[in-house]
Image (spheres, rainbow, N blue to C red):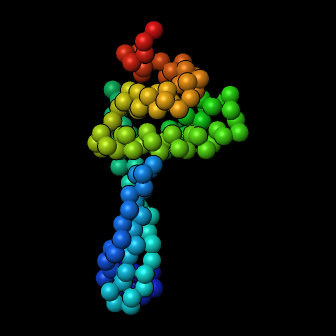
Amino acid sequence: MICIKCGRNNTSVINSRQNKKTSTVWRRRKCKDCGQIYTTYEDVAIDQILVISDIDSLPFHHAKLLISIANCFEHIPVKRAENAEALAKTVEAKLLYAGNKTTPEAISVAVYASLKHFDRLASVQYAAKHSIYLKKHLRV
């Protein structure tokens, strides 16, 4: 990593911690040349996931996931954005753990499972909107 003070590429990690709730890693770094100490927050690059469908393959989009989750929280609009962002991060972590390729069905199942544990009504609303992908996973 390049030092933020001197611009040289001679830094080392002196402390590192994994965030318990998200896939973010906190790192304390020190430049070996100028001695500058600084902190970085590293998150996985979700855009490296490829969504493969019958028709084509597209890169994963955080915004699409966020909107589809936020639409399920119409019953509590006050915390809609906050809840959607937290759940989107959870789903993205599950998808990244599974590999760099996924399907629309796998995304829907991961979202539904996360919503089911978080807010039952939101999970029902999501299932109604995405039933085409969840038929095998819903107990009707």
| Residue in the picture at 38% in, 57% down | 18
Quarter holding residue 74? top right
Q: Quadrant of residue 81?
A: top right
Name the side, left or right, on which 32 lies relative to 75: left
Q: Position of residue 68 (x, y in %)?
A: 55, 33
Place of residue 40 in the rendered image (x, y in percent of width and height, measured from the top left): 44, 69
Specify whether 10 is left or right of 120.
left
Q: Is residue 114 above or below residue 138?
A: below
Q: Which of 21 and 138 is in front in this view?
A: 21
Q: In which quarter of the image is the C terminus?
A: top left
Which residue corresponds to the image point at 42% horizontal and 20% vertical from the top-left? Answer: 134
Q: Which residue, as the protein is rendered here, is positioned at the far right?
A: 78
Q: Is residue 59 visible?
A: no
Please provide percent x and percent y for residue 42: 41, 61
Residue 28 appears in the picture as rendered: yes
Name the outermost residue toward the top.
Answer: 140
Establish if 49 lies above or below 112.
below
Residue 12 location, quadrant? bottom left
